[in-house]
Amino acid sequence: MRDFAIGIEDHYGWAHLVSIAVSGPDLTLLDKRRVDLIDAHLPTSPYHHETLQMERSDAEQLLREVKASASRSAHIALESLIGELAPATCRGIAIRIPPLPELPANVTEVHTNPRILYRADGMIYHQALTIAAAQLNLSVFHFDKSRILELAAQVRGLTSADLERHLKALGRALKPPWRKGHMVACAGAIVALGHGS
């Protein structure tokens, strides 16, 4: 059975998952989907919004709820996708380099550092996806979004322009949307497959 990788474009509260398989010169898009990474009743950007006006204990409680929801949602999303694509084997995920090395231990540390504050909410979802992948015994490949199309082109033996044309054509064969973020995720998956071989 064919192996595949999942390229991920993560956002605040949701992500695009793009699953691809490579066999010689052939690139096959197995699945693309948008998944929610947070329960609807919870805020998607708690560090940057809701917790700013809360007592510390209430803010920490809200963050625990958001992180638990993100972790649960990410695990379900990846596990469901892998199950649906079986008997193909998922070799790993590809996701951008994390916005922070790690999340600070408490909300006060986040609120007192603007650089961290503007990245912490994105880190919730990035961390949830990478931890879920590890729990599912998947390798995690981190990529630089500004260079991934070039790296994927090298893996495929193409120019960046040729790869981008190929990915655009691949997307046209699907139901919209198929945007730059989908192509970046797809390129990440290509490199992850090449990286793991």
Image (cartoon, rainbow, N blue to C red):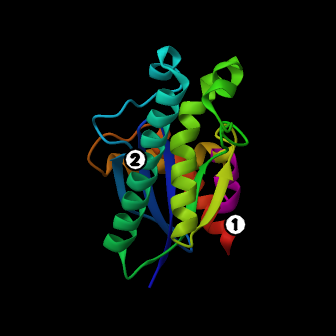
| Residue ranking furthest to the bottom | 1
Total number of numbered discs in the rendering:
2
The alpha-carbon separation of the residues under discs 1 and 2 comes to: 31 Å
**Numbered mark located on residue 152 in the image:** none
Can residue 112 be found in the magenta stretch?
A: no
Residue at 51% over, 20% down: 55
- 46 or 129: nearer the eye? 46
Residue 92, can we see it?
A: no
Report which residue position mark 2 lands on. 69
Which percent across, then down, holds residue 129? 51, 53
Residue 126, can we see it?
A: yes
SS for dot 2: helix
Residue at 66% over, 67% down: 194
Which percent across, then down, holds residue 68? 44, 49
> What's the magenta bit mostly, secondary-structure-wise?
helix
Q: Quadrant of the C terminus?
A: bottom right
Question: Is residue 114 found left or right of 35 in the rendered image?
Answer: right
Q: What stretch is highlighted in magenta?
A: 149-157
Which percent across, then down, holds residue 12? 46, 34
Report which residue position mark 1 lands on. 195
Crowding around mark 1 (Cα neighbors within 10 Å: few <14, some 14 to 19, many 20+) is few
Residue 178 position (above or below residue 80)? above
